[in-house]
Image: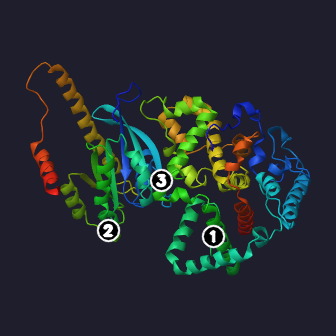
Amino acid sequence: MLKGKKLKHPDRLGVGSLVAGFEDKDDDSQGSGSALDLGEELKIIQPNGFRSGRETGIKMVKFKKRHWSDIEYEISQKVINVGKLQRIVSTGLPDGGNLSPTHLLGEESELARIKEEALHSNEQNKADSEQIDRDLQRTHPEMKFFSGESSFSRRHRCNAEADSFACFVRLLSDSVDHFSEQLDNSSVGILSTLSHLAELLKANDEELWRHLEFTTKESLMEVKPQYYAFRWITLLLTQEFNLKSNLRIWDSLLSNPFGFQEMLLRVCCAMLLCTKSRFLSGDFAANLRLLQQYPDINIEYLLKVAQDPSPDTSSYSLCKFIPYPLLHKAYLLTCFTKLQY
Amino acid sequence: MAHRVDHEYEYLFKIVLIGDSGVGKSNILSRYTRNEFCLESKSTIGVEFATRTLQVEGKAVKAQIWDTAGQERYRAITSAYYRGAVGAILVYDITKRQTFDNVQRWLRELRNHADSNIVLMMAGNKSDLNHLRAVSEQDGQALAEKEGLSFLETSALDATNIQKAFQTILTEVYHIVSKKALAAQEAKANASIPGQGTTINVAETSGNTKKGCCST
């Protein structure tokens, strides 16, 4: 599916000087929203669709409101145009808004069932939930997730936990094959996905691919995707970027018409392309260190590289269409937004 | 993997850290390579990697240390990381008996996936938690002797024996590699002398034959 598909090369995009503020959605003086001109008919953003990153705070607020109202409008339709909704959300969801999670999810009975299960199992497995708390703490120590002392009421806390769990279950259903040992050597297992990434890189930049696979200075020591992309792919990039950048990346992963997994591989490939010059000058150890501690980069730029502006439409039939996780993502974000305040 | 290369070091040795999840492998690595310790470090997913160059008997040796994920799930994938390793430090947690009992499983894992000449060391980590000790030093020592491994109790938290552990295993690897290099040189020089054939292990061969005979 991915073989031979070309991403637009960063060097050829001509957006290398994109304003840095794009990563910071909260900052009212800049922010991704302020720089985009999204009209009634929303389109996948084009590289040259960016305006100056400096816009007034008032305009930003207006944009946020319009962005949210666009989403609300789409969701309120009897028949939801998921393609349109995906396009709106692919540029990132702004914070705030008055969307009710259940409204967004649109599947109240199933949600209620999963929530019930989540709450029930939490009671049964105290040790598990303690471990989860610990993992959350050490994965994102800067975030106050579910700290017991927070002003967040107990009832909300329970709901948010169960809601997030429900979303997590749906999200995981898309990557579950990577966690199944029996499938390790099958066409849907993690090893096969890792070789897809190598193929994607080869199709997009054979020089870089060759360099990583063969020509590192210490011979016989190729930089294999197993050494870095295993974590990228299984953890959906959560250890490579901070939470805020991750939420932005997830917006694109979940709303992208290529499908979640394919977009994930495209982002991974873009991560390699965006740091090409450093790889070419580095030896095995330096390259592996770079890959295992990925540097801070402009997320909008990274996503632009990952997104093929002229996709090969013949492969669309092979892509999995995933409207639900998109809705869940919006929902998850609402949960997170609530939790932060 | 023991290439002689013309960089700032003369030898490059790949060492892997293995053992159950949570025994402190990543902290042993960070203590050794960056002199850092983190009580709440993240679980290792896949593999992590760091290097340090040191002197072994006057030679500059670059240690390339691979810290592998301890979780059971990842074993099928981490086994690929053993390729080319000349040394392995098998870590257990002295406060968790289970991690010591699993040492045998890790040894099997190494026998299946690593080079048969790999130099092994066992490290009983978290020796600073003596009051929570569940494995005595004697038990560790006894197992190490039985399996023919060198052994040390370590603490990544207070840095006890961390340097020593790496220095010990790297020195042992260096001895083997330099002995091999010497032997290769001698073999080359003596190539013309007859009677220096390969030793054939008769006992092993006959054992295998017997097994085959009984099973048929």
x and y percentages locating residue A169 in the rendered image: 62, 67
Image quadrant holding the N terminus of chain A, namely top right
x and y percentages locating residue A113 in the rendered image: 66, 78
Are discs 3 and 1 both within one chain? yes
Label 2 sits on what residue type? Arg
Q: Residue at x 31, y 59 (%)?
A: B105
Label 1 sits on what residue type? Phe
Q: Find numbered disc 2 in the image and state the secondary structure of the residue it sits on.
A: helix
Q: What is the C-alpha distance between the residues marked 2 and 3?
A: 31 Å
Label annotation for residue A165: 1
Instruction: Give the residue at mark 2.
Output: B97
**Residue B153 appears in view:** no
Place residue A146 in its image quadrant.
bottom right
x and y percentages locating residue B17 in the rendered image: 37, 50
Mark 2 or mark 1, which is nearer to you?
1
Q: Classify mark 3: residues with Cα within 10 Å, few (<14), some (14-19) or many (20+).
A: some
Q: Find numbered disc 3 in the image and state the secondary structure of the residue it sits on.
A: loop
Nearer-the-camera pick, A160 or A203: A203
Label annotation for residue A270: none
Q: Classify mark 2: residues with Cα within 10 Å, few (<14), some (14-19) or many (20+).
A: some
Task: Please give the chain letter of the residue carrying mark 3.
Answer: A
Label annotation for residue A184: 3
Q: What is the C-alpha distance between the residues marked 3 and 1?
A: 26 Å
Nearer-the-camera pick, A95 or A104: A104
